[in-house]
Image (cartoon, rainbow, N blue to C red):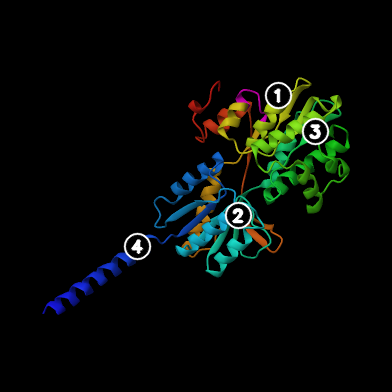
Amino acid sequence: MKSTLKAISLLLVIMMFAVVVAACGTSSKVSVGIVLPTKDEPRWVQDEQRFKDALNGTKYTTEILFSQGSSAKEKENVDALIAKGIKVLIICPQDGDAAAASVEAAKKAGIQVISYDRLITNTDAVNYYVTFDSVAVGKAQAKYLVDHAKGKGQPLYLYAGAASDNNAFLFFQGAWSVLQPKIADGTFKIANSSEAVGLQATAELTRDQLSKIIGQVTTNWDANEAKNKAQTHLTAASADKKGDVAILAPNDGTARSIADVFGTDKAVTSFVVTGQDAEKASVQYIIDSKQSMTVFKDVRTLVKDAMGMAVSILDGKAPETTGSYKNGKIDVKAKQTNVIVVEKSNVKSALIDSGYYQASDFKGL
């Protein structure tokens, strides 16, 4: 009798354990896996919350992981999400080429891949791309410099994002298409890149030519690297490369660093400096006339587009697209989001009235 009771008790324990394990397995299932580049930039922390908000009210679940600037960590994150049974992967790659291995693993597991904000390159394992029109961003930055040019022969300082980020090429390509005619007609003279000087007569640059210039003026999206480069360039600059200057800075973090350096050089009479992302600190710089403009990319729309695409896939529908991008292997279907130029005169209408930020976030508005 005792042995029968023991057997029954053991069987009950095993059954309960199996139920618990099954429950745990079910609860850990994730519908949409999201991998973002780093928690060290305000942009991506904001994205994290907006992704969480975007899935509220749906039957789907998400898990968001950060790669912290490491492609190896990115691969670990993707593998962890694959193990959790995701059906859709939304990934903003740390390095467009290096991320190919991660998404190829996802494809093998039958997962649909959405490249978010930055394009994953040289692989056929990307299904969709959600992006701001990166070429339009560069064009908007350059147009601002052209519109605020002072006379002829104005020194032009060029800076770019990371050479590992396809967007950096698109931003620079867009900027060059607007700046090059004004370099050719003598409005601007390039002050800090011998490669750009050597190509100043070339209207359309190849990938290799872009790479040569970006290699000289990259900031790697790093504020300290931007600061060091700007200091090096100004230290080496002759008097005719100072005075009233124009500065193509690729994003807000680098723009503030570069502006701080140029702002402390007494031989720099004035400067116009571009930016991108409408970070709070840069909006304050714009209000304080330390940064000239930023290209506002309403991340709420981008997140909504990415999540809308993911939900369409999960619901078995074909996501809406508006164009395509070549990634070196295939044409990736894309959904593009528009961008807005913000300067001192329209900070309130573009960023406060739209509900993106609160007026209380800023001084002197």
Question: Quadrant of the rendered structure where residue 140 is?
Answer: top right
State the CA–CA distance, disc 1 to disc 2: 36 Å
Label 1 sits on residue: 263
Q: Which residue is mark 2?
A: 71
| Residue 11 picture quarter | bottom left
In the depicted view, which residue is nearer to us: 9 or 255? 9
* Magenta residue check for 56: no
For the residues labelled 1 and 2, say whether their Cβ atoms are less than 8 Å apart.
Answer: no
Q: Which quarter shows the C terminus?
A: top right
Left or right relative to 46: residue 331: right
Instruction: Return the x and y of residue 73 as percentages of the image width and height.
Output: 56, 54
**What range of the chain is rendered magenta?**
286-293
Query: Residue 232: image x %, image y %?
Result: 76, 33
Q: Which mark is residue 24?
A: 4
Query: Which is nearer the N-term, disc 2 or disc 4?
Result: 4
Residue type marked 4: Cys
Look at the numbered disc 4 and give the secondary structure of its residue. helix
Q: Earlier in the sequence, mark 2 or mark 3?
A: 2
**Other-residue count near label 1 (Cα within 10 Å), few / some / many at <14 / 14–19 / ≥20:** some
State the CA–CA distance, disc 3 to disc 1: 15 Å
Label 2: few (<14), some (14–19) or many (≥20) C-alpha neighbours in 10 Å: many
Q: Nearer the viewer, mark 2 or mark 3?
A: 2
* Disc 4 versus disc 3: nearer the observer: 4
Residue highlighted by disc 3: 156
Residue drawn at the location 15% of the way across and 79% of the way down: 3
Magenta stretch: helix, strand or loop mostly: loop
Q: Nearer the viewer, mark 2 or mark 4?
A: 2
Magenta-drawn stretch contains 292: yes
Does the CB distance between marks 4 and 3 fall below 8 Å?
no
Dot 1 amino acid type: Gly
At a point 58% along the width and 35% down the height, the residue shown is 279
